[in-house]
Structures are given as C-alpha cells and as structure tokens.
Amino acid sequence: MRVTMLVLNDMRDDARVIREARSLSAAGHDVQVLALRSPDLPDVEDRDGFTVRRVADFTRAGLRQPARKLSERRARERALREAVIHSAPGVVHCHDTNTLDIGAPVARALGVPYVYDAHELYPDSLMQRPFQRSWVVQRYLRAAERRFIPGAAAVITVSDGHARVLNERYGVRPVIVANCPALAPVGDRMLLKRTLGVPAERVVALYQGGLQLGRAIDELVDALALVPALHLAVQGRGEYEGAMRQRVAERGIGDRVTFMGHLPHEQLFDLTCGADIGTLFLDGVTLNHRLTWPNRLFMYLMAGIPTAATDLPGASGVLSPAEAGLLAPPGDVDAMAAILARLAGDERLRQEMGARGRVIAEREYNWGVQEQRLLGVYERLCV
C-alpha cells in the first residue's frame, strides 16, 4: 500500500514518525512523508526505506501580522494538499490535528481512507499559550476534530488516557501505539559522566526533552538547589531555555547543571544509560500533560534508571505498578527535592527501581511490541 504521511515539521528528528515510517516500509508499504522545508535540509531525502519530501514552507509572520500569517498558512496548506494528490496515496496518515484538516478532505476527495495519529490531545496541549487557548483557535481545532476524527479508517494514539478521552469525545476506539524506543542492551554506564566531565561517583540526574511551558522547569531548578549531591544534565532546547539558564544562575548552581543542547535521537539512549536518575516533572495544568506517556519515560525505563516524576495519571500509571520510580505532587518543590534526595542517597534503591523498569521495557514498552499494533492497523486497511 502507498502510505502518504503528513507532518508540520521538517522531519529533522521526529522520532515517532521516523519509527512508524520505517516499520511500515519494512513491512512492504511504500511510505512518503510530506514535511516542511528547511534551508539546511534537502527537499527530497531517502531515509531507512521511506522518502521524506519537503514540499511546503513554515509560516514566518508573527501574530502581529495576521493577514500575512493567514496568507502563508493558506499557501502551506495548498502546497501540502497538492503534494498529497500528486503522491497518489492508498491511505493518508495524518499526524496530529494540525494536519487532519489538510489530509482528511483530500483523502475523501480521492476516495481513499485516512488514519488519524494523535500524538497528543492537540487542542488541550495548547491551553497554556495565550493565543492558542483563545476561543477562536480552540473552536477551530475542536471543530476539525469533531468533523474528521469519527470518519477516520483508524485512530492511533500514544497512551491509554488519550485513548479514553478520544473515545469519550468522538466515539472512536483508538489503537495505542506508545512512543517507545527499540529494544537495545543497556550501554556504557560511564559514557554520560565522561561526556559531562564529572567524577564517576557523582550522581547525575537527567532532563530530556524540549524546554517548554508545562515541564515544571522552574520547580526542577528550585528542587535541584535543595539537593547538593546532584548534577543535572539537560538534553534539549526550546523557548524556555533562557529562563532556565537565568534561574540556574540565580540559584547559584551553575556548576551543577550542564546544558547539552539538542542531541541526535540516535545518541540519546547511549547517553541515557549513563544517568543515575531520570526526571519527568510536569505542571499538570493541561489535560494532555496529566494523561501523557512522554517519550523520555520509556527511554529511562529502557536504560534501567529510576524515574523521579510528577504524580499524574499518565506517568504514575506506568511507574507505580512496576515500582520503577518515585512520585511527587504537582508543583511541590519540597516533595520533588525529597524524592530526588532519596534516590541520590540510595544507590541500591536506584538499582532496584532501574532493574524493575528495564523488565517492563523488555516485556511491553519497546518498539518491537508497539510496532505490531501499528502494523495490525495497516493489515486491516489492506483487507
């Protein structure tokens, strides 16, 4: 089957889409991913058996230039629609709501099925951003979901909580395909510390992912300041990086925090294996964050390191049954510091929790298991 995927990024490092496209290609499908152009990336790129075609442009205008921004958006949508038609798809695979209202109408016009892949509860994920949480934006996004999700040939999502909400809202029965890494042996436990230039006996906690609103970054820095035994490695970039750096400086802990920047996805697992603790703190303000199973959760489990996390239904639903981490209430800096200090001071506890996490990663939370659910969706579509 010819599968045309739609994303609104440049496909530089979209781990979920790469995994799905690679798996479908390996299963014999002809996969093209239609993405956005970037000046330092080719318009056409062959990757692991599938093709990335960068066919449209990012919008550049700011919110203070609404007419220009609307014009750029329409041009982008038009370019993506034309590319979908030109690809002659057997199925259109829409990644998130912001591609659904492009791909679904084209699929209907062509008489082919479309798949909706909900990486998150998209409208809910935007509720901390002033413009995106506005009535007009939320109404538009939720109307698009009501219009197109029920008509999808299949709905895929990333956690059981997300699946429940999509079922309640739209009457669909999503297939859960979690964002898990491929099963791999635990790597060099000293690689990260050598990279950071810290002593082997130093306890290193890891923050992995985008530096964005909702990630409890201020609280993490404040908690770190209360746990002198810890060094924090920050892997990722984002709009909140400047504020995080400033807060680290204000707390006088710059010598205990290393900003590693954005790292290629292929390097993350090996470096994660060298951490002592994985952090997964969220503020829990949005429904999306309360229910999510973040990528880094499964990276920590696979690496066999314990997780210090916020006690929210998504993460706790994985960690608590396995006893693979410790939890703190949302926004409670003292409780966050307490669980970080407990893990930092107890090597045996870290090893036991890490080993339990590794067990559930080997049994359930790895891409070899998850991809079978994705392939099952496409087997049904081919019938």
Image (cartoon, helix red, strand yellow):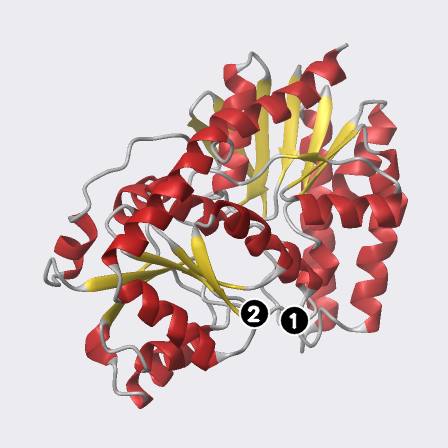
**Which mark is first along the chain, 1 or 2?**
2
Left or right: where does residue 274 sit relative to residue 210?
Answer: left
Image quarter of residue 279: bottom left
Q: Quadrant of the N terminus?
A: top right
Check disc 2 and report the residue beneath it: 214
Mark 2, residues whose alpha carbon is within 10 Å: few (<14), some, or many (≥20)? Answer: some
Tag 1: Cα neighbours inside 10 Å, few (<14), some, or many (≥20)?
some
User: Amino acid under label 2?
Assistant: Gly
Q: Is residue 125 left or right of residue 306?
A: right
For the question of whether residue 260 can be seen, the reply is: no
For residue 19, above or below residue 299: above
Point out residue 249 in the picture as x, y percentages from the top left corner: 29, 85
Q: Assign the C terminus to one quadrant of the image.
A: top right
Q: Amino acid at mark 1?
A: Val
Q: Is residue 362 above or below residue 76?
A: above
Element type at mark 1: loop
- Residue wearing tag 1: 285
Tell whether 185 sits left or right of 65.
Answer: left
Q: Is residue 244 above or below residue 32?
A: below
Q: Could you say where residue 179 lies in the image, as x and y percent from the top left? A: 53, 40
Residue 113 seen in render:
yes
